[in-house]
Amino acid sequence: MKDLISVIIPVYRVEAYLRRCVDSVLAQTYDNLEILLVDDGSDDGCPGICDAYAQKDRRVQVIHQENRGLSGARNAGIDRAKGNYLVFADSDDYLAPEFVERLYRACLDTGSDLALCRFAYVKGEAIPRAGGGEIEVLTGRQMQARLCEPEGVYYVVAWNKLYRRELFEGIRYPEGRIHEDEATTYRIFHRARKGAYVDEALYGYFVSPASITRGFNPRRTDWVTAMEERIDFYEQEGYKELMVPALKYLADSSIHIYLERQDFLGEGKKEQKHIRELIRKGLVRVKPYGKFPLRTRMGYRLFLACPGLYRKLLNRVMSESGKQ
């Protein structure tokens, strides 16, 4: 008998897109599904849409709850799920018909605890296929390393994956924060013996006009908190080889957040002081594990001494590289 797979879909103010998402799940070639629609206190037509799907298809169950945010909705789904495997989908995104089957088969064929795939940015069209479909098997440690690489976004997000349920025992998404994936996925990878990466876009990440034009979210600093927690975890659990790339990733991205915050909100002395202190401590903390490249060290020291001059030089470098 095929394993039951639970698909958890948090729902909040997505009336225009919800049907497309749920229909893509109902159309999966793998049909032994439990589909959990978590109505997170949505105040539009979503609750009614969810209930209508539950009446039409016995695989659909609805959880109505007061608003707890994305993490709280996912956690409610995890708590209710009965499947041997878990899948998360955001309610404005959509899946290729073979998404679940391909990831499930990759887990079985490779003996992996989780499987993941590419995703494509979409605006409502069919998911454009990218990648050759090859399967790469990685250890949990190798997946940790991928988090700080250029294509790390495929690894960190929650929703392009299929997980053995046991991976979430004692682990839940942090409520009251954004960047919840950054705060959680590395803990899942730490538990996983193996993971299978399917090199094909099987998940459509919907890019709405609002998401293109929105400004800076002050809670972006939640990302910094999540990354600090991850580095502490790496140090405690003996991931020595990841300390240099993780500290560099934290420093580079924190500087970007620092400058972005200035653009949209002006000076934020408390947050900016914290980021400068992170860079300063990072230059010291890295020493037992290696060192940053010389150019990187010089850049960090320039940022600490004069963020304005650092920005001018950064803009010049980016402008020159864009002309090439």
Image (spheres, rainbow, N blue to C red):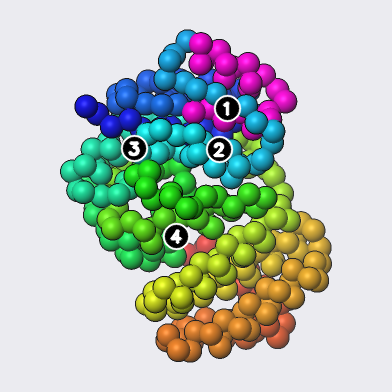
The location of residue 215, given as percent across then percent down, is 71, 49
Task: Check the image and report above or below for 211 versus 234.
Answer: above
Specify whether residue 42 is painted magenta. yes
Task: Check the image and report above or below for 245 versus 155.
Answer: below
Question: Secondary structure beneath disc 4?
Answer: helix
Question: Secondary structure beneath disc 1?
Answer: strand
Question: Secondary structure beneath disc 3?
Answer: loop
Q: Tell which residue pokes out farthest to the top in this image.
A: 56
Label 2 belongs to which residue? 76
**Earlier-in-chain disc, 3 versus 4:** 3
Question: Looking at the image, do the residues carrying marks 2 and 3 touch, with CB atoms under 8 Å apart?
Answer: no
Question: Looking at the image, do the residues carrying marks 4 and 1 touch, with CB atoms under 8 Å apart?
Answer: no
Q: Please report the bounds of the magenta region as a residue range.
A: 36-55
The location of residue 284, given as percent across then percent down, is 56, 88
Label 3 belongs to which residue? 84
Label 4 belongs to which residue? 186
Residue appearing at x 47%, y 49% in the figure: 157
Label 1 belongs to which residue? 63
